[in-house]
Amino acid sequence: MSAPDTNIEKQEKRHKPALMGIKGAIGFGVLMVLVLLFFVIGNGRDDETQPGLSSDTTVAPVDPVATGTNESN
């Protein structure tokens, strides 16, 4: 059974704070998803593709059996 006398303007005025809160929560959720997406995409690239790093430098492998390589002795 519906209300016999409905005043749309009065109901809109009464529900305005709740509706604005819902819209704010939706906006905040969308903003957080976009920030998360930006963060994941920004940190998901390979180290070789970042500027300033060169892959032509080689490091000699460490011989674990050689004398003087074990610091605990």
Image (cartoon, grey):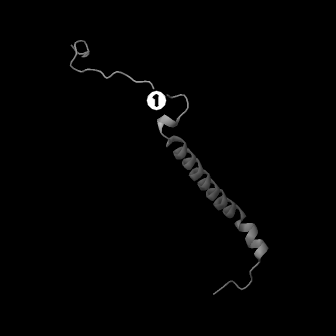
- Which residue shows up at 54% across the image and 48% down it? 36
Return the residue nearer the eye: 25 or 8. Answer: 25
Quadrant where the image shows the N terminus: bottom right
Q: Quadrant of residue 63?
A: top left
Asked if residue 70 is positioned above or below residue 43 in the image, the reply reads: above
Q: Position of residue 59 (x, y in %)?
A: 38, 22
Residue at x 52% of width, y 46% of height: 40
Within 10 Å of disc 1 (Cα), the crowding (few <14, some 14-19, many 20+) is few
**39 left or right, relative to 57:** right
Give the amino acid type for the residue marked by disc 1 in the picture: Ser
Residue where numbered disc 1 is placed: 55
Q: Residue 62: x percent and y percent?
A: 29, 21
**Left or right, residue 6 beside residue 24:** right
Q: Secondary structure at mark 1?
A: loop
Q: Residue furthest right?
A: 9
Of all residues, the one furthest to the front in this rendering is 56
Residue at 55 percent across and 49 percent down: it is 37
Where is residue 64, by image quadrant?
Answer: top left
Along the viewing direction, whichever of 45 and 48 lies nearer the viewer = 48
Give coordinates of residue 24: x percent, y percent. 66, 56
Q: Please say if 26 is above or below 45.
A: below
Name the quarter where the C terminus is drawn. top left
Residue 70 position (above or below residue 56): above
